[in-house]
Amino acid sequence: MDNTMPILLVPGLVSSPRIFAPVVPALWRFGPVTIANHIRDDHMGAIARRILAEAPPRFALAGHSMGGYIAFEIMRQAPDRVAKLALINTQARPDTPEASERRRGMMARAKGDFRGVLDELFPGFVHPSRREDASLRQLVHDMGEDVGVEGFIRQQTAIISRPDSRPTLAWIKCPTLVLTGDEDHTIPNSLSVEMANGIPGAKLVIFPNCGHLPPPEQPQATADALVEWLRN
């Protein structure tokens, strides 16, 4: 295939490459897949700069949750390097004061009981029907171990200070997919609708029976949507 396109995947808060494991095989056919490391800096601008320094010259970019905030920063810094954009269970809005306060509380608790913080986050991460799913809870704990307490604190610090990306939505000119679940209790899908309405020509997909983590919750549907995004 000589029209291959490198694919750059950016995980979310307290997420690691494991979040994309169910969909990577389907994407890999279209080009080399890189999963960004987003745990080393505590500011969106610095995270994006470091990812760009390590990324291919031009790529298809997919960001999940916090990864979407980073994707917006990448679009601000290097829009010409992004051939296609996928925004998965994310939002363009900045943090509210209430959300920032909750984050600071989690950061403080994580230093003494990180596992407890992960358990606190879990119900908001998955569809209500999956809150007793031991394998999904284990995935969240495993990814927490990958990220670590210090990485988690850096991520939350970066999220708190992220800019409002709504004014820049209209500047996005590349083909864009906005993907979310019907019952995302972490970032409501109304905020995905807002992004799709703001980005010229964006395609909106809302999965039924899905929460905040489409790749492990709805792996086949997620892979199919991303494959279509890469093909078109």
Image: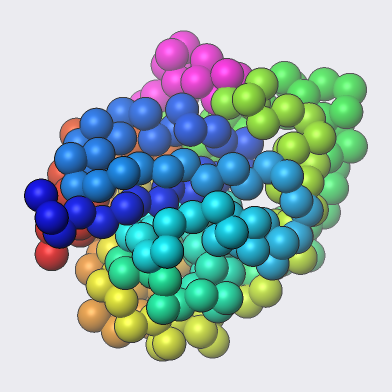
Task: Report which quarter residue 198 is drawn in.
Answer: bottom left
Task: Give yes or no for residue 23 being in the magenta stretch.
Answer: no
User: At which x and y percent is residue 99?
Assistant: 72, 56
User: At which x and y percent is residue 141?
Assistant: 60, 20
Q: Main secondary structure of the magenta part?
A: helix
Q: Nearer the viewer, residue 139 or 4?
A: 4
Q: Quadrant of the C terminus?
A: bottom left
Q: Who's the residue at 24% across and 42% down the image?
A: 27
Residue sitting farthest toward the front: 2
Against 159, is 119 above or below? Answer: above
In the image, is 161 to the left or to the right of 57? right
Against 130, is 26 above or below? Answer: below
Image colouring:
rainbow
In this picture, which residue range is highlighted in magenta? 129-142
User: At which x and y percent is residue 33?
Assistant: 35, 42
Q: Who's the residue at 55% across and 52% down the image?
A: 54
Q: Nearer the viewer, residue 17 or 168?
A: 17
In the image, is 112 to the left or to the right of 63? right
Against 50, is 109 above or below? Answer: above
Q: Who's the residue at 36% across and 60% down the image?
A: 59
Against 132, is 96 above or below? Answer: below
For residue 222, say whether it is visible.
no
In the image, is 142 to the left or to the right of 181? right
**Total numbered labels placed on residues in the image:** 0
Q: Who's the residue at 18% across and 40% down the image?
A: 29
In the image, is 30 to the left or to the right of 161? left
For residue 147, say whether it is visible.
yes
Q: Nearer the viewer, residue 26 or 217?
A: 26
User: At which x and y percent is residue 195?
Assistant: 41, 73
Q: Nearer the viewer, residue 16 or 51?
A: 51
Task: Give yes or no for residue 140 being in the magenta stretch.
Answer: yes
